[in-house]
Amino acid sequence: MTPNPYLFIVIFVGVALAFPLIPLALAWIWRRIFQPSKPGPDKTSTYECGVESIGDAQIQFHSQYYLYAIILLLKRFAGGLKRK
């Protein structure tokens, strides 16, 4: 009696799925058991060195800054390759 040739693949996929899912499930169970009480407004407020924050913490940058940074990184990386 020869084993099914796809048995190894099924076992491999099962282990590949179980390997990350078991720690995630254990972490979820741990959180449900040991979770502290629900946070109130004091716990969810922003704390910055004891000073109340002014304005919004989210600042939207223009896409030109990101493009400039990517181009700068590419120039630095390409320049490092040419020096050899």
Image (spheres, rainbow, N blue to C red):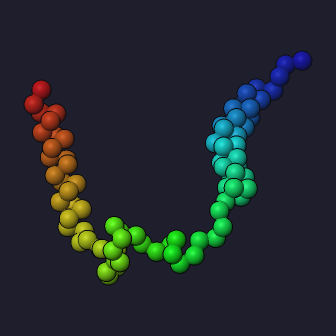
* Residue 65 placement, left or right of 11: left
* Residue 16 placement, left or right of 72: right
Question: Which percent across, then down, holds residue 16?
Answer: 66, 37
Figure disc tally = 0
- Quadrant location, the C terminus: top left
- Residue at 89%, 18% (x, y): give it: 1
Residue 70 lies, with reference to residue 51, above or below; the image says above
**Residue 83's image quarter?**
top left
Question: Which percent across, then down, holds residue 14?
Answer: 72, 37
Viewer can see residue 6: no
- Residue at 71%, 58% (x, y): give it: 32
Residue 31 lies, with reference to residue 57, above or below; the image says above
- Residue at 33%, 74% (x, y): give it: 51
* Residue 1 placement, left or right of 66: right
Considering every residue shown, the one lying at the far top of the view is 1
* Residue 49 placement, left or right of 81: right
Query: Observer-nearest residue: 21 or 27?
Result: 27
Question: Which percent across, then down, holds residue 82?
Answer: 12, 33
Residue 37 lies, with reference to residue 79, above or below; the image says below
**Residue 60's image quarter?**
bottom left
Considering every residue shown, the one lying at the far front of the view is 50
